[in-house]
Image (cartoon, coloured by chain):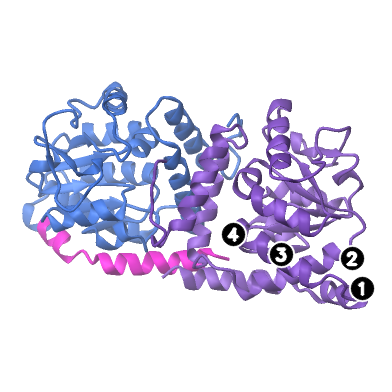
Chain colours: A purple, B blue
Amino acid sequence: MNEHIPKSHPRHRSLLLRERLVHGLEAGLTSRAGLIAHGRGEAFDYLLGERTHDFAREAIAAASALLWTARHPVFSVNGNVAALAGEELAGLAKAFPKLKVEVNLFHWSEDRLTRIVDHLEGQGIADVLGLGETEDLPGLESARRRMDRRGIASADVVFVPLEDGDRCEALVASGRKVITIDLNPSSRTAQRASITIVDELTRALPALQAQLVSDRGRGEEELVWRRTIHDNADVLRRAIERIRQGAV
Amino acid sequence: MNEHIPKSHPRHRSLLLRERLVHGLEAGLTSRAGLIAHGRGEAFDYLLGERTHDFAREAIAAASALLWTARHPVFSVNGNVAALAGEELAGLAKAFPKLKVEVNLFHWSEDRLTRIVDHLEGQGIADVLGLGETEDLPGLESARRRMDRRGIASADVVFVPLEDGDRCEALVASGRKVITIDLNPSSRTAQRASITIVDELTRALPALQAQLVSDRGRGEEELVWRRTIHDNADVLRRAIERIRQGAV
């Protein structure tokens, strides 16, 4: 990219993320298809005014409640998530050690999987899963059906940001609760997840980390109540409304 | 990408364009930044329902009138345009030989420029400009300021699809009429151009070709009238309205 953009540039942050992604492509973490997918997200973030809205904060609070009350929550990482948010994910995993991290790839190869595991462990995340023995998630044909026995296969809550609709659907159909981060509130993933955070990944993860920390020690009853009353359809409706306003 | 999608797939066409772009990256025509930019466009096209709307047809009719009544119209090609629409551009240039084609790059190198010129000439476009003597377009710092003396430097009308706002502005400020194709009606390029076709490139170019053919032999007075009454602000307003509806 070779774009040297001053911090004052209105699109500074967006350009930094592009650089992370291009480095990720060079390091063999992400794919070219991932670059195009990122561009789609950029357009939606532009329409959202590139900020975290109330409807995202509500979903983040519900996600924190669901994660605290989960038996075995697992965070599923693909190439774009690794390239864009390795640092933010490491912060989250450190603040909330119960959350296991598992790599899951569409364009699967052992080489690429190992590279992503190494990258995440290099960021300070311990015991990244995905290379161990796997089981298949029913209803999915691509390599993304693979679930590590110690990870998603035995999880009750799966956090799958930037995910395709078919995997989100298959995870929901398997009886697991699904949290996602997706900038397009009309996507199949956004519509099918249990909790949808309509926000940019590297803004949402630190916000979730802060929420998890502030919820530490909170009573189970309050957390269960918070996740029970969460109205994901309402969140999505408000996000769509905001995108409509953004198209000015 | 290795995506083998049946023709019946609802996103067949969108995936074909991705393949063209990835081939363009492999062939050294386009840049990784170009892939992200394409993704942004995809999101807007999704909100537009992936079809050519009335406001685009109106702009295409005005563009045809402007091109027929121009003294020296030039079509400016960047890496994404070459990778996505070489074939469609060749059809247009053949149907309307007055239109010269010139390559203009942000990430400039003589090697890359030569590669794109060769690619376009291989598609059947004669005498592609960009490698000849150049002048500088005032107000622009990047390599995109270069104007071929036989091309944009002496042009009265410049057709610049998928362009950044600063170059569009500099071309307008230089007194030239500018036609663009841009899927984001709120972009600086869309807002500043004389005529903005809010549509996907490979849909719009064949539609423009058909319009140019149907306008052949039409009286100058009628064409001047048509381009004079064209209301670009109204076109943009309607495109924004449609995108708002698309966010459902």
Number of other residues with Cα within 10 Å of mark 1, as a class: few under 14, some 14 to 19, many 20 or more: few
**Which residue type does callout 4 highlight?**
Glu
Distance in Å between CA atoms under marks 4 and 3: 12 Å
- Whether residue B136 is in magenta: the answer is no
Q: Is residue A223 above or below residue B82?
A: below
Instruction: Locate residue B6, reporting x and y percent.
Output: 61, 34
Q: Are marks 2 and 3 in contact (CB under 8 Å)?
A: no
| Residue sitting nearer the eye, A167 or B56 | A167
Q: Which residue does the numbered mark 2 point to in the structure image?
A: A69
Q: Are marks 1 and 4 in contact (CB under 8 Å)?
A: no
| Disc nearer the start of the sequence (1/2) | 2
Q: Is residue A39 visible?
A: no
**Which residue type does callout 3 highlight?**
Leu
Chain under disc 4: A
Number of other residues with Cα within 10 Å of mark 4, as a class: few under 14, some 14 to 19, many 20 or more: many
Are both tags, 4 and 3, on one chain? yes
Disc 3 element? helix
Q: Which residue does the numbered mark 3 point to in the structure image?
A: A208
Q: Which residue does the numbered mark 1 point to in the structure image?
A: A220
Per the rendered image, the range of residues in magenta is B223-248
Q: Is residue A190 visible?
A: yes
| Disc nearer the start of the sequence (4/3) | 4
Chain under disc 3: A
User: Considering the image in quadrants, where does the C terminus of chain B appear?
Assistant: bottom right
